[in-house]
Image (spheres, rainbow, N blue to C red):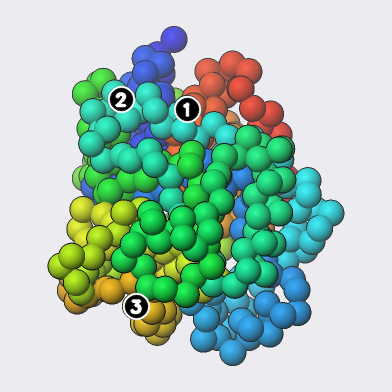
Amino acid sequence: MSREIVVLGAGMVGVSVAWHLVRQGHSVTLVDRREPGRETSFGNAGIIQRESVRPYAFPRDLGTLMRVLPNREVDIRYRPAGMLSAVSPLLQYWLNSGKTRYAKIVPEYASLIMRCLETHAPMIEAAGADHLVRRDGWLELYHTQKAFDARLVEARENRELYGVEFEVLDAAGLYDMEPHLKKGLVGAIHWTQPWTVADPGALVQAYAENFEQQGGRFLKAEVQGVEKGGKGWKVTTDRESLEAEQLVVALGPWSDKLLSRLGISVPLFVKRGYHMHYASADDNARLNHWIMDAETGFLLEPMRAGIRLTTGAELADLEAPPKFKQLKAAEQAARRIYPLGERRDPEPWKGARPCLPDMKPIIGPAPRQEGMWLAIGHGHQGFTLGPVTGLLLSQMMAGETPEVDMAPFSATRF
């Protein structure tokens, strides 16, 4: 039975939800203040991360905490005001990163990650977006044998438990694959399953265009209000008012602002990040794969716009003004392993990852709000998990039994 549905948010998650709903035969309007894929989904590393079956835990060992405390690292920085405003969810995040709690979270989280490729694949095909996608994995680089060996222990456990595939590269093998990296690295893990995307925003845009080709409607408008009324829900925008039987909230880091006005409290906080594109300093140099300096905490990605450098996380308020010292530190570190040239962008990009304290997204009905559904809080993996979220939520909305146990992703857990 066809229903009228409004989806708020046109990042990877919202577009994927809308795509699945329109394929079920519903009348779907997708709403965002910007074109699809121009906010958080635009600025990520562009990896569909099949290997990432363990969510990012809060550091708990003393050595890491002492390293981070001076606030000069590439992988994580913080602003005291931002940490104070999110003190409760950050405390829960720290508690959930403990061994016992984290061991329960990982298989629940992995149940989504393990389906990321099989859910992106039909969307890529339908959108004609194969030219944006590479299927040769990515490289995780190491400077020290100790850190490399520790990571390999975890990688082998992930292979046994979750079917993660990889190859171990010694220094010779690494430099054979990436001859223009500077010497001194001890080796790398080649994650062979993930797919990489040369323009993440363009992939989201391609999915959105295919959604429209199938009969969906995209409305570029600012949401001004949401309330019960008419057919079920009334959405007021700066362009027009919409009425729908059902409403999906997929507004990423802005979701809690809308939900709080409806009396729904979710412990959302953000991890911000920055990126910049570069040329190669040497015309003969080439970066063949997406690479991550695992011990420093940055990634380099050979994208259409140039070599993208992405930083780690910044714990700060969503709307706090940017500070580019983390990016500058990442750039200095990146130049030590690859001949980066001049910057190509007029200014750095800044975005925010919407996070929840147990590292899992909310996917399912909103509490005490009949006809409202949530797809929020995907943290670092919204780009990876958008399509599987869309599939599972559309199954729930149709009254079907989802392919995954959705209890761990219920909003009621908070």
- Tell me if residue 120 can be seen: yes
Looking at this view, name the residue that lies furthest to the front: 172
Between residue 142 and residue 350, name the one nearer to us: 142
| Residue lying at 49% horizontally and 39% vertically, measured from the top left | 193
**What residue is pinned by disc 3?**
335
Q: CA distance from mark 1 to mark 3?
A: 36 Å
Label at residue 118? 1
* Quarter of the image where one finds residue 229: top left
Three-letter amino acid code of the residue under disc 2: Glu
| Residue lying at 55% horizontally and 44% vertically, measured from the top left | 166
Q: In this rendering, which labeled residue sits more in front, label 3 or label 2?
A: 3
- Tell me if residue 321 can be seen: no
Three-letter amino acid code of the residue under disc 3: Arg
**Mark 3 surroundings: few (<14), some (14-19) or many (≥20) residues within 10 A:** some
Q: Is residue 368 left or right of residue 256?
A: right
Q: Position of residue 15 (x, y in %)?
A: 36, 37
Are discs 1 and 3 less than 8 Å apart at CB?
no
Q: Position of residue 135 (x, y in %)?
A: 38, 38
Three-letter amino acid code of the residue under disc 1: Glu
Chain-order first, disc 1 or disc 2: 1
> Is 146 situated above or below 152?
below
Chain-order first, disc 1 or disc 3: 1
> For numbered disc 2, what is the local secondary structure?
helix
> Is 20 situated above or below 161?
above
